[in-house]
Amino acid sequence: MNNEKIERINFLARKSKSEGLTEEEKFEQAELRKEYIEAYRRNLESQLQTIVVVDDKGNRSKLKKKNVN
């Protein structure tokens, strides 16, 4: 996600609070938010994959992804 898109998200949020959004702007805002959340999740997952847990015996292991149903 680039800075232009983040600035656009912020602009639409401010405009929504002050004067309201058109239907096109609401759709654009929803799409931008969805894209932002997906990028955030990818970044977080990437960071979590680099974490190593060390137990009391000094054994190192990576975090394991939980299956959430």
Image: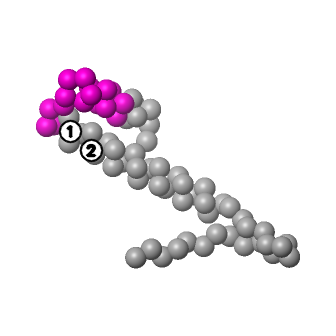
**Residue 50 located left or right of residue 4:** right
Provide the residue designation for mark 1.
26
Can you see residue 8?
Answer: no
Residue 8 position in % (x across, y down):
34, 31
- Quadrant containing the N terminus is top left
Residue at 44% from the left image edge and 37% from the top image edge: 2
Residue 34 position in % (x across, y down):
33, 49
Residue at 26% from the left image edge and 44% from the top image edge: 30
- Quadrant containing the C terminus is bottom left
Residue at 52% from the left image edge and 74% from the top image edge: 66
Q: Amino acid at mark 2?
A: Ala
Q: Secondary structure at mark 1?
A: helix
**23 w.r.t. 39: above or below:** above
The furthest residue to the top: 18
Residue at 73% from the left image edge and 67% from the top image edge: 53
Q: Marks 2 and 1: in contact by CB < 8 Å? A: yes
**60 w.r.t. 20: above or below:** below
**Residue 2 located left or right of residue 11:** right
Q: Are there few (<14), some (14-19), or many (20+) residues within 10 Å of tag 2?
A: few
Q: Is residue 11 magenta?
A: yes
Provide the residue designation for mark 2.
30
The residue nearer to you, when weighing 56 against 24, is 56
Residue 6 position in % (x across, y down):
40, 34
**Residue 30 located left or right of residue 37:** left
Q: Is residue 30 magenta?
A: no
Q: Main secondary structure of the magenta part?
A: helix
Q: Secondary structure at mark 2?
A: helix
Which span of residues is magenta-colored?
9-24
